[in-house]
Image (cartoon, rainbow, N blue to C red):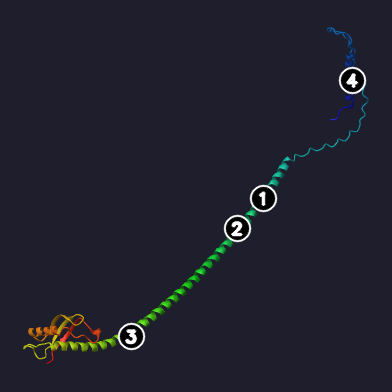
Amino acid sequence: MIRDPYSIVSTVMAVLVHVLIFGGLFLAFDFSRPVHPAMPLAIEATLVTEQTKPPPPVVKQPEPEPEPVPEPEPDNSAAERLKAEEAKRQADLRAEQERIRLQQEEDRVRRQAEEAERKKRKEEETERLRAEAERKRVEDLERQRQENERQRREAEAAEIRRRQQQEMEAEENRLQALQADDLTRWVFALQQAISRNFVPPASAPIGLECVVDVRQVQGGTVTNVSIGRCNGDDAVRRAVEAAVYKASPLPAPANPRVFQRDLRLIFKPEQ
């Protein structure tokens, strides 16, 4: 809104007049007089009204072009807030993307480590199985070698025993043959010794034959005589028994190996 310049001037002049009046009243006061109680004074005053000249005729001036009113600055608080929120969102998005990238990288490294550990365990297990198979193979070979060695030793021992057995049997047969001859000769000597001491009774039959069991001790001493099967009577039995005791001690064998404590003789007296 544009104010009238003439109205402003009138107002200023009225204010100056009032200031002059109050200033004159202040200067008219005599400060040198003693102070007495204030007495009311009668002052006559005439209100002077400022005479203003009639305003000159208004010459219509061309209206000045209105100054361009600066447009109010737009309220950018909402935009700034949105911009800050968008920047924060972008920062959070980048941070989340970085976290995801780091997590993925960590997962990748972890998977690689797990894969390497799995391969390592698989290789270790393969190596363990190979070593176990090799150990078992070596053990089987050693066990087979020991078994073959055992069988070889047993075969050799069996062969040695067989040869020894053959040799023993051959020696035994040889000894038995020798002893048989010695035993035959000894039994013949015993029968002769008993026959020399036999006194046949009248009832002795021709072709007398009695089985005589004789027990003796070392040295030929007879300790017991028993007459078994015999074709003679009791008198003949007693005569045979008496002949055995009379022949004691019985002759010793030429080969001590053929000596027997218990003998069974077939007694046939010489006719």
Tell me which numbered mark, 1 or 2, is placed earlier along the sequence. 1
Residue at left 33%, top 85%?
A: 167
Q: How crowded is mark 3: few (under 14 residues within 10 Å), some or many (20 or more)?
A: few
Residue 194 position in % (x across, y down): 14, 87
Q: Are marks 2 and 4 in contact (CB under 8 Å)?
A: no
Q: Residues within 10 Å of mark 1 (few under 14, many from 20)?
A: few
Image check: 84 left or right of 268? right
Residue at left 29%, top 88%?
A: 174
Front in this rendered view, residue 116 or 128: 128
User: Depth-wise, is mark 3 or mark 1 nearer the camera?
Assistant: 3
Residue 208 position in % (x across, y down): 11, 89
Q: Using the image, tell me which numbered label, if any, was put on residue 167.
A: 3
Q: Distance of mark 2 from mark 4, alpha carbons?
A: 96 Å
Q: Distance of mark 3 from mark 1, alpha carbons?
A: 104 Å
Tell me which numbered mark, 3 or 4, is placed earlier along the sequence. 4
Q: Are marks 1 and 2 in contact (CB under 8 Å)?
A: no
- Residue 143 occupies which quadrant of the picture? bottom left
